[in-house]
Image (cartoon, rainbow, N blue to C red):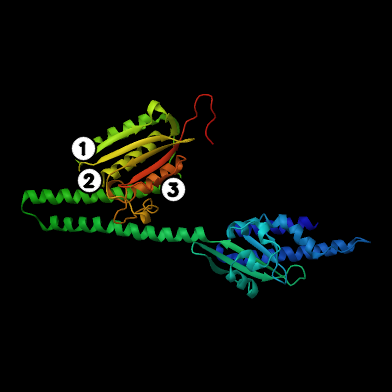
Amino acid sequence: MTRMLLLLVIACVTGLGVDRLPGDLDWVVALVGVTIAGALVVTQREAAARPHTVVVPAVDVVEELRGILALLPEGILVVDADEIVLVANPAVARILRRPPEAMEGVTLIRATRDAALVQVLREATGEPRDVALGDDRLVRAAATRLGTDAVHAVLTVQDLTALRNAERARSELVANVSHELRTPIAAARALAETLEAGVDEADQRQHFHERLTHEIERLGEIVERLLRLSRLESRAEEFDLQPIAVSELLRIAVARLSPVADRAEVTLVAEEEPSGATGEVVTDRERALEVITNLLDNAIRYSPVGGTITLRAEALDQAVRISVRDQGPGILPADRQRVFERFYTADRARTGGAGTGLGLAIARHIVSRLGGEIWVADETPGATLSFTLPRAPRDGADAPA
């Protein structure tokens, strides 16, 4: 009967923990308290009803709860009156980045290594409080007292880091979009007003019309790339993964960008390991070409006149690394992680094809969907952007994991 009651209440707790917002964490804390208190009462009654049976200590109930608390998505710490952690479920171990066994049997301050969480437990108001763990994590914690000999209180912890990062990214996106759209909108409006006021010279009218068309096309391209990025992030685009020779990808990419390189007076060079050692990759042909041409176009725009851009493919154990290296100003170490963010710009950061600041962000999402990674290499001078694609299995060999 005890297990049936526990499973029923835990099912309610789990359902509320998933469906409710972080602000309703107090409900989760209260229900966990009810679960433990109810289990204690039921166990004592069951034991007392059996003749010639010693009443089961409450601590045995806590041991029985260990497996059931593992079902909860919220982090749970059960402590005694001396603030010794009796139970730490897997969720709290993931949040605090410590093994559960290292958190049990020690004081709460040693288990969590955070004084703010200890303060939440000591106050035990049941009201959720946001607590910063270091510089990169945010949790919401709440505690309630049970008042039994074996179980003094329950501390519940919920990770809000992803939610905070999503809110920050959303705010930055709105600010960046507003900033990027402001310039072409203002330019288009000024040109339209000038044309509306009347321009006598035909060549001047033609010039203003061309500039207006250019600004409108720029607006359209920003909007289209934002929609494309949104589709990639939501995985709305279907990818057709097929084996394709790496040499073919390099040949097509160079052919597509050669006219652009010629106009910029830049030389494109494709290099591949001898004897076709790179073989084939499993990828979406057009998506892979989009990434390569994006990196080549980006390198062309930052290369000096007379410079050389090298497109190289190298075989790894279960992947092929494709790199684009130029002789431009390079990318500062502080910018190398952020150049793949939408609209991110810096003095020497690359912002993607056609100057929208979205090209590298789109490339990152495509490579991720293709099962690879993309990064800025440490090689200097110039800049080297590399990404990987999974290798196709060779005859008689298993597909890469």
- Residue at the (77%, 62%) spot, across then down: 39
Indicate the position of residue 199 as horizontal and vertical percent values: 8, 55
Q: In this image, 156 relative to 178: left or right? A: right
- Mark 2 belongs to which amino acid? Pro
Q: Residue 36 sits in which quadrant?
A: bottom right
**Secondary structure type for disc 2:** loop
Q: Which residue is drawn at 23% across and 42% down?
A: 307
Residue beneath disc 1: 262
Indicate which disc, 1 or 3, sits on the residue closer to the N terminus.
Answer: 3
**Can you identify the residue that label 2 sits on?**
304
Of mark 2 and mark 1, the one earlier in the sequence is 1
Residue bearing the label numbered 3: 233
Q: Distance between the residues labelled 1 and 3?
A: 34 Å
Quadrant for the N terminus in the image: bottom right
Amino acid beneath label 3? Glu
SS of the residue at dot 1? helix
Q: Position of residue 12 (x, y in %)?
A: 67, 58
Q: How crowded is mark 1: few (under 14 residues within 10 Å), some or many (20 or more)?
A: few
Q: How far apart are marks 2 and 3 (CA)?
A: 34 Å
Q: Is residue 236 visible?
A: no
User: Do callouts 1 and 3 mark residues in contact (Cβ within 8 Å)?
Assistant: no
Residue farthest to the left, as pictured: 201
Q: Which of pointers 2 and 3 lies earlier in the amino acid sequence?
A: 3
> Which label number is shown at residue 24?
none
**Mark in the foreground, 2 or 3:** 2
Residue 279 visible, this angle: yes
Relative to 398, is 290 above or below?
A: below
Q: Position of residue 310 (x, y in %)?
A: 31, 38
